[in-house]
Amino acid sequence: MDDRILILDYGSQFTQHIARRIRELRVYCEIHPPTASAEWVRQWRPRGIVLSGGPASVYDEGVPRLPPGLLEVGVPVLGVCYGMQLMAQQRGGRVVPGRREYGRAEIQVRGTGELFFGFESGEHITVWASHGDHVDEPPAGFELLASTADLPVAAFASAADRLYGVQFHPEVAHTPRGTEIWANFVLRICGCEPTWTPGSFIEESVARIRAQAGSQQVICGLSGGVDSSVAAALVHRAVGDQLTCIFVDTGLLRKGERESVERAFRRELGSRLVVVDASAQFLDRLAGVEEPEEKRRRIGASFIRVFEQSVQDAGSGASFLVQGTLYPDVIESQSVRGPSAVIKTHHNVGGLPEDMKFRLIEPLRELFKDEVRHVGRELGLSEELVGRHPFPGPGLAIRVLGDVTRERLDLLRDADAIYLEEIRAAGLYDDIWQAFAVLLPVRSVGVMGDARTYENVVALRAVTSRDGMTADWYPFPHEVLGRISNRIINEVAGVNRVVYDVSSKPPATIEWE
Ligand code: XMP
């Protein structure tokens, strides 16, 4: 196993960013809840440990603490915000409650040491701060590394004990030189070798999947998205003909998607493919359901039932099911294991029924989206498959807001197809991380010819992002937006208004439900 870093998650919205920054340095890392014991940590054998930030105060009751003995495990530890405060408190430093600071701040580097290697002493740098309490005095034996007028201890270190703390968030883009700080910690202080690559990932996964599946049959649900295609290609490499792929037409797909997936799949993956039309069943289960999480649960449950039936019909007797679950899904759904708040239950993690007959193979469980794309390319998949915008498992059901009916799905499909067609025609598809239309559950008044109309509103969403965890709305040229809006209103019967979504994530999410 390569060198790896353990991240203990104290519930910060930025914990996943820490993992991203470390993976970008080509070092493997995992996020775990802080309930892990020091003994477990020792056995996990990290080269270093990061304590994330979190919303708690060290002065509150029942808040997550440092596992006893953690700071003595013998590997370097970096505490970020709340993680730093826990470290300071345990080592006898002073943590002052209150005085919220949120946003950009400027700190002055005081001592450089290993953590600020490459920085000048006295230099001012911009950082992103988000904390309530703060450390006022470093513990005995700790050196002050940075401070601001408001924040006397912005960073500290005990080189002898290899303990480090920063009161700001070097993992977010708003700390422009944060990457250097991560590189200093991970590569310099922990001494990790940057060897974690798609190639090494593929080798390890293939071996693991073979060991897991043995000579048993495996099925994979293809959604047409990047994740399930890459998962299928990886499993196909591991178990060859033991794999049967099943593509379920849920009735919640985009226009022409079933045909295009079939074409691309047959051309590139080459394993057995069964296509099942289950749209009636899915729409039945969704009738009258408006609540997004309930939609996800029902879709997840229907998926599995359809699979079980299809597998029986195909007579393959599979005992394993491949899922294209990604790391952000795992973390966002792991309410019971860690304190990071559950935002949405992604169906491929949270919605599976407990009495499911399959055992799961989730070969991408540890990867972020851009890493999946690298793996896909390395496996020889075309840019057409690998470069596709992500598409959520529950499909258009979470883009027809409120009640999902066949009519509303058809209307959305038509609007969405025009939207994507125009984006491609303008040569913008690859600049955008994800673009889609949303059908709102409201009607608006319009005028067409001389007549009043009272019809549907379509919202357009387009975002840029690296991994879906944060996103910015895409600044379309006005004439492109104008063309899209004209075409949708003129060509899609039942739509008289188009609006463009200008919300970033956070605080919005990418999907509307
Ligand atoms: P949000 O809306 O959470 O979306 O900002 C982040 C990314 O995840 C996709 N998404 C899902 N994918 N099942 C999935 O497989 C889901 O239930 C689901 N919900 C959101 C979303 O399209 C975006 O790429």
Image (cartoon, rainbow, N blue to C red):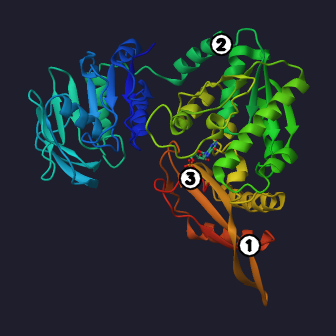
Against 495, is 509 above or below? above
**Disc 1 secondary structure class:** helix
Asked if labels 2 and 1 touch by Cβ distance under 8 angstroms, the answer is: no
Q: Nearer the viewer, residue 374 or 291?
A: 291
Q: Which residue is disc 2 drawn over?
A: 212
- Judged left or right of residue 186, residue 281 is right
Residue 151 locus on image (x, y percent): 16, 48
Q: Nearer the viewer, mark 1 or mark 2?
A: 2
Using the numbered discs, state the Cα–Cα distance from disc 1 to disc 3 in whole angstroms. Answer: 24 Å
Crowding near pointer 1: few (<14 within 10 Å), some, many (20+)?
A: some
Q: Which residue is disc 1 drawn over?
A: 489
Q: Mark 1 belongs to which amino acid?
A: Ile
Q: Earlier in the sequence, mark 1 or mark 2?
A: 2
Residue 78 visible in the snapshot: yes
Residue 486 locus on image (x, y percent): 70, 73
The C terminus, quarter of image: bottom right
Q: Earlier in the sequence, mark 2 or mark 3?
A: 2
Q: Is mark 3 within 8 Å of ligand 1?
A: yes
At x 33%, y 49%, the residue is: 174
Q: Mark 3 belongs to which amino acid?
A: Ile
Residue 266 visible in the snapshot: no
Q: Quadrant of residue 383?
A: top right
Q: Is mark 2 within 8 Å of ligand 1?
A: no
Q: Nearer the viewer, residue 347 or 421?
A: 347
At x 74%, y 73%, the residue is: 489
Q: Which mark is residue 281?
A: none
Q: Which mark is residue 510?
A: 3
Using the numbered discs, state the Cα–Cα distance from disc 1 to disc 2 in whole angstroms. Answer: 52 Å
Residue 346 locus on image (x, y percent): 61, 41
